[in-house]
């Protein structure tokens, strides 16, 4: 196998995924929920930016029980990758999605009898069974059906030929807020519906934060996304998670800037003394936030270096004046560890005024994903 150093020597920028850390996070969640509760690995949005082509096979090998996605097309992509475990589509589906869902053994979250009938027709035509989950809107007011509608819809779906109502689900509104007490009310509403539908065998309500905070909401499966990436949800007990994703680049140029001169578009940063700036070939086209200009930091030579000037579509500058040896080809770390220093996704999210999910999911396909075990490359995926 190729070493990480050899694989990245001639790359401008890349996302690096630590598969050993991913395995450790699956094990940590398993210890938390036990063997009786399934781990539903949420791999929507290109596995939160980590790359579903490399993440899904690793998660399946690590022993997760199901995958969850949002679109039917994401589930089809998983099947094309060779996934054999159950796949739940959490988001909206059209009646037209029914044939491909049945053909690929995808479990749709069914919100209407119209979709249910389309699934029934497709299952009859293909000689298969269409499994569905029903999502109860207990207060988040996103996708799903109201508590009042859910029992009637479940019974109607149950009566359709070749349709199996396998699961009942909901989603918590403030799972990672300092006060998550509304989860108690949501659970009460969900439990009331579940009591009227005792024949539905599989129930899942918890995302990463809820799984860490509220054992009573583990039920038959927990939907884990952020925790598998090694990011501790806010206001939750420590789960000993390990970050899996780093964003790295190679310095493309080092230039001298005279005192008083400005850099990048608008000349919004001017050197207060003779300075040296390093060009980092990552920009907002890669998902790196333009708002980080003159605010963020990058690791070069094991030290934090300030981002200076306006961030461009494909590149930005950092001040390396205090690093006289900095040169073209040096490794720069935008997210991750270099030496004793760490820049976490949570830090980037705070500076950008967003959340870690957004930071990860924004990383674009132009950045190759390099999956490693130790210092050796396991696989590389590129757009």
Image (cartoon, grey):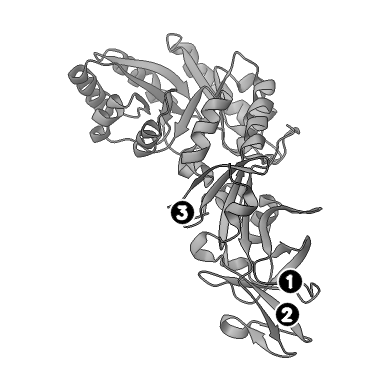
Can you see residue 368?
yes
Residue 324: x %, y % from top left:
79, 75
* Residue pointed to by mark 3: 365
Determine the CA span between mark 1 and mark 2: 9 Å
Residue 210: x %, y % from top left:
63, 30
* Residue pointed to by mark 2: 276
Q: Residue furthest left?
A: 125
Q: Earlier in the sequence, mark 1 or mark 2?
A: 2
Q: Looking at the rendered structure, which numbered label has been put on residue 326?
A: 1
Q: For numbered disc 2, what is the local secondary structure?
A: strand
Residue 334: x %, y % from top left:
66, 59
Q: For numbered disc 1, what is the local secondary structure?
A: loop
Q: Earlier in the sequence, mark 3 or mark 1?
A: 1
Residue in the image at 66% along x and 32% along y: 25
* Snapshot quadrant of residue 237: top right
Residue 80: x %, y % from top left:
36, 34
Number of marks in picture:
3
Q: In this rendering, is residue 270 above or below 166?
A: below
Q: Nearer the viewer, mark 3 or mark 1?
A: 1
């Amino acid at each position: 196998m190729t070493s990480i150093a050899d694989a990245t020597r001639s790359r401008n920028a890349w996302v690096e995924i630590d598969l050993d850390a991913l395995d450790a996070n699956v094990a940590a969640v398993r210890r938390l929920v036990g063997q009786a509760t399934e781990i539903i690995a949420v791999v929507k949005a290109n596995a939160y930016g980590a790359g579903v082509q490399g993440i899904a096979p690793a998660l399946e090998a690590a022993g997760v029980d199901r995958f969850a996605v949002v679109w039917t097309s994401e589930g089809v992509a998983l099947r094309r990758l060779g996934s054999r475990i159950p796949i739940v589509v959490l988001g909206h589906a059209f009646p037209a999605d029914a044939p491909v869902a049945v053909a690929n053994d995808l479990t749709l979250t069914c919100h209407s009898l119209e979709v249910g009938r389309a699934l029934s027709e497709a299952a009859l035509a293909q000689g298969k069974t269409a499994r569905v989950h029903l999502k109860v809107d207990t207060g988040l007011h996103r996708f799903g059906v109201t508590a009042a509608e859910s029992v009637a819809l479940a019974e109607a779906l149950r009566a359709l030929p070749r349709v199996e109502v396998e699961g009942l689900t909901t989603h918590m509104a403030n799972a990672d807020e300092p006060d998550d007490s509304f989860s108690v009310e949501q659970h009460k509403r969900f439990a009331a519906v579940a009591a009227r539908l005792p024949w539905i065998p599989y129930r899942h309500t918890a995302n990463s934060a809820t799984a860490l905070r509220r054992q009573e909401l583990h039920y038959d499966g927990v939907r884990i996304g952020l925790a598998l990436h090694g990011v501790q949800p806010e206001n939750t007990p420590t789960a000993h998670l390990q970050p899996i994703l780093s964003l790295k680049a190679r310095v493309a140029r080092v230039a001298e800037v005279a005192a008083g001169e400005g850099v990048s578009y608008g000349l919004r940063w001017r050197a207060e003394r003779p300075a040296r700036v390093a060009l980092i070939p990552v920009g907002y086209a890669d998902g790196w936030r333009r708002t980080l200009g003159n605010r963020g930091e990058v690791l070069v030579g094991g030290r934090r270096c300030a981002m200076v000037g306006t961030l461009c579509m494909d590149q930005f500058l950092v001040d390396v004046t205090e690093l006289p040896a900095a040169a073209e080809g040096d490794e720069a770390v935008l997210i991750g560890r270099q030496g004793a220093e760490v820049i976490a996704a949570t830090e980037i999210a705070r500076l950008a005024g967003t959340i870690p999910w957004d930071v990860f999911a924004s990383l674009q396909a132009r950045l190759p994903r390099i999956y490693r075990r130790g210092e050796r490359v396991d696989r590389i995926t590129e757009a």
